Amino acid sequence: MKKAKRNPLLARRAARLTLAYDNRSSAQALPSRALFERWARAALQGGDERAEISLSVVDAEEGRELNGQWRGKDYATNVLSFALNEGEPIPGMPLCGDLVLCAGVVEREAAEQGKPLAAHYAHLTVHGMLHLQGFDHEDDQEADTMEALETRILARLGFADPYQGEKGNA
């Protein structure tokens, strides 16, 4: 039997991300761990960056508690990002952080926005990963930069521009 050749570029890219996945939600329609990992890997910026990321999917009650504890907001939000060292690189250390996706909020938003559920999960995974790397949207210029990067990453993954509806209304 012939042995398959391994692509060293793909092996190197795969080694860049270690993803711990924890589904603590009661949601039935979740993307696979492999899809979350693919989306997170696609959002890594910088060729040599290594990342150790924990991604959890939670229900609204836990999402609300976390958002209240860490952001002072009394509601569940779609994605929370917690970066070690606030996203600033530590020499010799991989990018480390936690992403928390709230299944109920993601499902509701996807339905309200008329988007496929997988596309919305992909978008929020990419969005959260960019936050872990120091990207933000506190002002218009930062928001434009981050949204353009998200749109490019998602296009490479085969998803439509997540901001298209907003741009059409501007």
Image (cartoon, rainbow, N blue to C red):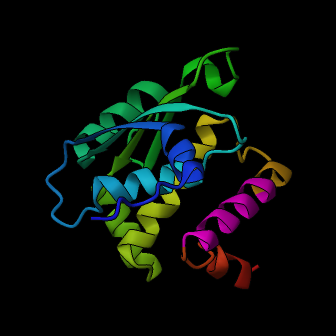
Above or below, 37 relative to 121: above
Q: Quadrant of residue 131?
A: top right
**For the point 41% across and 62% down, which residue is it?**
121
Q: Is 133 colored magenta in this rendering?
A: no
Which residues make up the magenta segment? 144-157
Residue 108 falls left or right of residue 155: left
**For the point 65% across and 27% down, which residue is it?**
87
Above or below, 12 relative to 70: below
Q: Quadrant of residue 92?
A: top right
**For the point 72% across and 48% down, which residue is it?**
137
**Residue 35, image x and y in percent?**
37, 59
Q: Is residue 146 visible?
A: yes
Q: Is residue 78 visible?
A: no
**Residue 75, image x and y in percent?**
38, 44
Above or below, 123 relative to 137: below
Q: Is 145 colored magenta in this rendering?
A: yes
Residue occupying the far right of the picture: 141
Residue occupying the far front of the picture: 1
**Residue 148, image x and y in percent?**
75, 63
Of residue 75 and residue 44, the one placed in the foreground of this image is 44
Of residue 161 and residue 69, the one placed in the foreground of this image is 161
Residue 156 falls left or right of residue 108: right
Of residue 150 and residue 15, the one placed in the foreground of this image is 15
**For the point 45% across and 47% down, which residue is it?**
79
Prevailing SS of the magenta stretch: helix
Quadrant the N terminus occupies: bottom left
